[in-house]
């Protein structure tokens, strides 16, 4: 376990040093971002052109996808959670209006690109996606990830309860950590500053509809029921690790075990 702790520590240190803070310009609005992720969009093989129409919250919008014949759909950002605003059906939360205003200033009535993950829609019927907005840096044009912009500028936090692309999850968690240190946005409040951070080690594990244990993907009894879930969430719900397939256990980075 000591070796695993050291390996995780090294990986996290490398990730930290690989994130260079910059200011990108989005039609006159400057926002914090990271130079290493200016070209993230280049790896997206499939996306839709969309028009963001109305901002409901910092993480929830209405949109029109060109292929849907101007049909208005509700969009929820993947991997980030912003406080509820006055435009939401939920109770207004601290910094909710600021988060919505930030989204409005950058996205409202703007054409963007929308890419997807493995789960296309949530239980509320909202499309789940990554929003890519045109931006410039040092005279060059890029498509930057708005999901990451929200976290980097302190208008939301990494949200890993539901599984999504591992490479994005790691970046979101680290961006939140840096935003906390810099007291960006909502992290300037003592209430939010004391909120537990997302764990750095948070892989996908699997549960069944009826069981009380979680498993690795190859566990034979998952054939009838196989539900993907993040390790941190499965532990929060009280599931225990399977003694047969030996799935990963939650590791608190910075804490050594006695083994």
Image (cartoon, grey):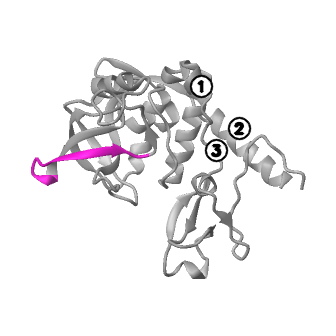
Q: Tags 3 and 1 in contact by the CB under 8 Å rule?
A: no
Region of the chain picked out in magenta, as a range: 67-78
Specify whether 71 is left or right of 50: left
Q: From the image, tell me which residue sits under label 2.
A: 13
Specify whether 244 is left or right of 258: left
Secondary structure beneath label 3: loop
Would you say residue 145 is visible in this rendering? no
Which percent across, then down, holds residue 156? 46, 32
Q: From the image, tell me which residue sits under label 1.
A: 193
Which percent across, then down, holds residue 94? 44, 23
Q: Which mark is residue 202?
A: none
Identify the image quadrant of residue 82. Answer: top left
- Residue at the extreme right: 258
Which residue occupies 64% across, 35% down? 16
Mark 2 crowd level (few <14, some 14–19, many ≥20, 10 Å Cα): few
Tell me how far mark 3 sits from mark 1, CA to CA: 15 Å
User: For the N terminus, which image quadrant?
Assistant: bottom right
Q: Which mark is residue 199?
A: 3
Which residue occupies 35% across, 53% down? 116
């Amino acid at each position: 376990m000591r070796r695993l702790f050291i390996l995780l520590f090294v990986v996290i240190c490398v990730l930290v040093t690989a994130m260079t803070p910059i200011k990108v310009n989005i039609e006159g609005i400057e926002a914090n971002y990271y130079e290493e992720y200016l070209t993230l969009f280049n790896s997206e093989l499939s996306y839709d052109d969309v028009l963001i129409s109305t901002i409901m919250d910092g993480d929830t919008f209405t949109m029109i996808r060109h292929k849907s014949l101007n049909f208005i759909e509700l969009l929820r950002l993947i991997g980030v959670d912003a406080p509820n605003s006055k435009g939401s059906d939920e109770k207004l939360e601290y910094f909710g209006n600021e988060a919505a205003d930030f989204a409005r200033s950058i996205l409202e009535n703007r054409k963007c690109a929308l890419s997807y993950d493995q789960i296309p829609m949530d239980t509320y019927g909202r499309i789940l996606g990554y929003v890519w907005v045109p931006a410039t840096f040092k005279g060059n044009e890029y498509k930057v990830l708005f999901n990451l912009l929200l976290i980097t500028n302190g208008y939301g936090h990494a949200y890993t309860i539901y599984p999504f692309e591992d490479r994005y999850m790691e970046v979101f968690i680290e961006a939140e950590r840096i935003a906390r240190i810099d007291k960006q946005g909502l992290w300037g409040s003592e209430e939010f500053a004391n909120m537990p951070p997302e764990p750095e080690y948070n892989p996908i594990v699997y549960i069944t509809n009826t069981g009380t244990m979680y498993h690795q993907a190859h566990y034979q009894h998952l054939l009838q029921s196989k539900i993907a879930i993040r390790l941190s969430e499965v532990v929060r719900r009280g599931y225990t690790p399977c003694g047969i397939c030996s799935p990963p256990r939650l590791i608190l980075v910075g804490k050594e075990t006695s083994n």
